[in-house]
Amino acid sequence: MKSEEMSTDVAPPTFDEWTKDKPQIVDPSMPISLKHKMNIDIETANIDSRETTWLCINQPAKHPHLGARIRPLYAYTETEKKILLHDKSLDWNKLPSFLRTELSLRLAEEKTQAEQMGDALKLGWATEPSQQTPLSQYLEPAIPPLYRAMLLAGCRIPLTWFTDHYMELACDVARLVTKDVTLLTKEDKLLTVTVIDVERMLRERAWPDDLGSHSLTLSTWQSARENFLRVCHTLADPSDATDGKTNITAELTRHFAHFAQELGTEYCVNCDYMRNFGNWYPVERALRMEIFQKRVFNRDVWQNRVIPVMDFAEPPRPPARTNYNNPNQAYSNNHSGSRKRRHR
């Protein structure tokens, strides 16, 4: 390492070149593994330089040489930081120290943010007895952490994003475009949370919206509905909605139950509702959005909004009734032509 000799006649007016960090070099094309290696070497060289410079400043007679000038580090992109932050297989000991510090601060912020959001919205994350997880739950897609944050913050998530495929994709934060939003809590405190930038995801990543019936089929709507309610159950238990009290999960459960009841069961299917999915889905979506505003499900209102858009099939005509006391109808249904006269 090259060092510089300090003049004994005139001391330098400042040692910034030997003590302060340089602006980081931004090079998105550099492989992340090479950034790790380069930054670790640069950090080691800068530490040696600062130690040599300190000795030179404080003991110039014994240590007349300044350390080498401080070298700039290579910056990591936001996408690289998100990938590293949520990579559970990553060995943090192999990262440069400044990156470890930044990632640790981010993890602490995420934890604090979750705790603050829970306190602000009065959510109970009580410790409960451990129970064996049913096999069916292992087959369900994991709940993306940002989904819960978005629902708590009142952000819209398209129902199409609750299909199994997109829930699995949303668990990988590196696939998402995020943004920070500032909320006002019940205690009039400002709270900043990270959410998915829905508009940019729709525009840049081609994730599907749920505005029209073309984005969902009846079967994918049923699957997304179940996943959506499963996420809501983690935020508010519908069983708590008693004694004149309610919550969004309880009202959404009644809302979806109404349409499920109209569709019927596998033993008694309402063909009109199945055939008219494209007609009633936009109404279902609009009513679902109203629940987030009014929180009240009303069966009569729901029926009055849905029935006008239904295209009911023509009801079947009742079979002709035969009057066996009228001799003119004795052969009305089973014979063509005139009635034959029987001969004795």
Image: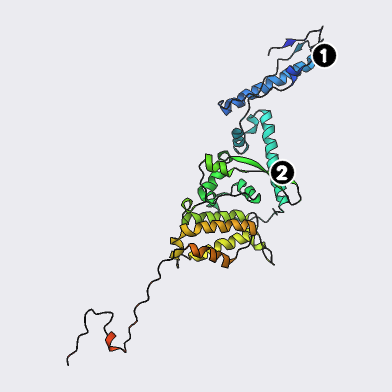
Q: Position of residue 142 (x, y in %)?
A: 57, 49
Secondary element type, mark 2: helix
- Residue designated by label 1: 59
Residue 107 coordinates in the image, percent (x, y): 68, 39
Q: Residue at x 70, y 50 (%)?
A: 118
Residue type (three-letter) at the residue carrying disc 2: Thr
Q: Residue at x 76, y 11 (%)?
A: 65
Q: CA distance from mark 2 to mark 1?
A: 45 Å
In the image, 58: left or right of 295? right
Q: Are marks 2 and 1 in contact (CB under 8 Å)?
A: no
The residue that mark 2 highlights is: 112
Residue in front for this viewpoint, 147 or 318: 318
Instruction: Judge left or right: residue 42 versus residue 278.
Output: right
Q: Is residue 95 above or below residue 70?
A: below
- At 27% from the left and 86% from the top, the residue drawn is 328
User: Left or right of 260: which side holds 235?
Assistant: right
The percent position of residue 241, horizontal first and vertical second, equals 66, 63
Viewer can see residue 222: no
Locate residue 232: give its quadrant: bottom right
Residue situated in front as seen by the camera: 254 or 40:
254
Comparing 58 with 90, the one in front is: 58
Q: Is residue 91 above or below residue 191?
A: above
| Amino acid tagged 1 | Gln
